[in-house]
């Protein structure tokens, strides 16, 4: 079981220094306690992977927001980002320009308008 666990997760976990610290369900050492330990280990591995993926997604979103902020005064009318693949052709250029306009001009005004509408409807 421990061979499946990544080394950094094993190194972060602190071993039990006393036998009384081990949960009572694992102290028996029989088949059922090993099954429950295996299930708990697999659940923790799944949670670790899920959190790593979530962290990567949040980082990517933060980098994209930085790129949009940096591209607001761009004269070319396109987002300067390594996260976006430029489209080819005339329609691709139009799509890139519309994406630039959406992220830098239209979307902030749209959200302000929606906030104002929500304030008016809440009164």
Image: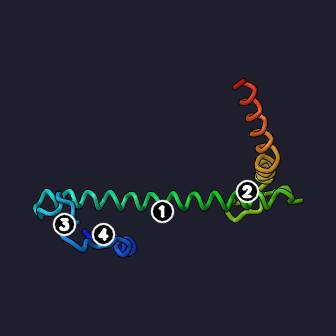
Give the mark, 4 or 2, whose residue is nearer the N terminus: 4
- Identify the residue shown where x is 78% and y is 39%: 112
User: In front: mark 4 or mark 2?
Assistant: 4
Residue 52 is tagged as 1
**Which residue position holds label 4?**
4
User: In front: mark 3 or mark 2?
Assistant: 3
Q: CA–CA distance between discs 3 and 4?
A: 26 Å
Q: CA–CA distance between discs 4 and 2?
A: 42 Å
Q: Position of residue 19 (x, y in %)?
A: 18, 69
Secondary element type, mark 2: loop
Secondary element type, mark 4: loop
**Which residue position holds label 2?**
87
**Which residue position holds label 3?**
20
Q: Is residue 13 visible?
A: yes
Does the CB distance between marks 3 and 2 fall below 8 Å?
no
Give the mark, 3 or 1, whose residue is nearer the N terminus: 3
């Amino acid at each position: 079981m421990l061979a499946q666990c990544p080394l950094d997760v094993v190194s972060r976990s602190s071993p039990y220094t006393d036998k009384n610290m081990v949960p009572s369900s694992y102290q028996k050492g029989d088949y059922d306690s090993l099954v429950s330990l295996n299930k708990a280990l697999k659940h923790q591995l799944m949670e670790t992977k899920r959190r790593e993926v979530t962290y990567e997604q949040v980082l990517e979103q933060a980098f994209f927001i930085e790129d949009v902020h940096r591209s607001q005064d761009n004269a070319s009318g396109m987002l300067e980002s390594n996260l976006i693949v430029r489209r080819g052709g005339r329609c691709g250029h139009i799509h890139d320009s519309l994406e630039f306009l959406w992220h830098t001009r239209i979307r902030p005004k749209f959200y302000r308008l929606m906030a104002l509408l929500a304030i008016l409807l809440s009164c």
